[in-house]
Image (cartoon, rainbow, N blue to C red):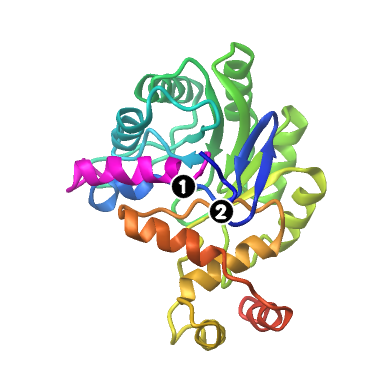
Amino acid sequence: MSSVSLPGGTWTLGDLTVTRFGYGAMQLAGPWVMGPPADHDGALAVLRSAVELGITHIDTADAYGPHITNQLIREALHPYPGSLHIATKVGATRDQQGGWPPARDPQSLRRAVQNNLETLGVETLDLVNLRLGNAEGPQPGSLAEAFQTLVELQQQGLIRHLGVSNATAEQVTQAQTIAPIVCVQNMYNLAHRHDDELIDVLAGQGIAYVPFFPLGGFSPLQSSALSSVAERLDAAPMSVALAWLLRRSPNILLIPGTSSTAHLHENVAGAGITLSDEDIAELDKIGR
């Protein structure tokens, strides 16, 4: 499979080369990321289509479902192509109300890593992100004990690379004093630009930045500038938002999710549209 047609080219996570345009598997689970999908075969088809398109970076978590998205990934793609790399997250679990209570004590983290290994059907996880904060966003506080637990699991050969998610800039720095990280996964898009400085710092260090919910927060009413640029380019606003993220910095990796193969193809095509310097200048005003 070739990734030549994918927008953005590739990025290196430690010793792993991945396409900058990836796929986020969260939406493959049922409503509110709980339970199985309504269309099981359709979910498998989306995953297989992603690989057929040349995508080599899939983002998941055993908490999705829980266990559902990992099981779908395994059913659809195992044994995995050597070029395919799967990133997962630990540090939060699910409750019966669909919440995401923190689970960052050493025992919970070890159990979560083991669950990911089993449900994905691998002996080593390519990339594990430590999820911090809560549903409100990043929260201040030390990550030392939790991150050190993951470092120990890495030393045991269960994890290849480490990252942090939903983290403050201070927590990113603290993690780096304990062990190398290859990515930071935070909320970021055209309208939510709070991590601009962090993105630039990480780019200088060769560390990836992976925005989650990259398409959230937009409508024609919320952003006339986005609608204006999209209309001028005869493109969907969401396509413009994805293309802007790829232009924003070379270390940004995209993981837009969908449960539809048609929407997956639309996302890939949309992210490949060309934005002029005028377009970029107009879009940059949205989050400033």
Looking at the rendering, which quadrant does residue 281 occupy? bottom right
Per the rendering, the mark at residue 228 is none
Looking at the rendering, which quadrant does residue 181 occupy? top right
Which residue is labeled 1 in the image? 53
Question: Is-magenta flag for residue 186?
Answer: no
Query: Which quarter shows the C terminus?
Result: bottom right
For label 2, the crowd category at 10 Å Cα-Cα, with few meaning under 14, some 14 to 19 and many 20 or more, is few
Question: Is-magenta flag for residue 53?
Answer: yes
- For the point 52% across and 18% down, the residue is 124
Instruction: Judge left or right: residue 220 versus residue 5.
Output: left
Is label 2 in a helix, a strand or a loop? loop
Nearer-the-camera pick, 34 or 137: 34
Rendering coords of residue 153 (x, y %): 57, 17
Nearer-the-camera pick, 194 or 51: 51
Question: Which amino acid type is shown beneath numbered disc 1?
Answer: Leu
Rendering coords of residue 118 (x, y %): 37, 19
Cα separation, mark 2 vs mark 1, equals 8 Å
Viewer can see residue 95: yes
- For the point 61% across and 63% down, the residue is 245
Residue at the extreme top of the image, as rendered: 156
Q: Are marks 2 and 1 in contact (CB under 8 Å)?
A: yes
Residue at the extreme right of the image, as rendered: 204
Question: Which amino acid type is shown beneath numbered disc 2?
Answer: Ser
Query: Is residue 157 positioned above or below 205 on the image?
Result: above
Rendering coords of residue 69 (x, y %): 33, 37
Nearer-the-camera pick, 223 or 228: 228
Where are the magenta residues, as a range? 34-56
Which residue is labeled 2 in the image? 5
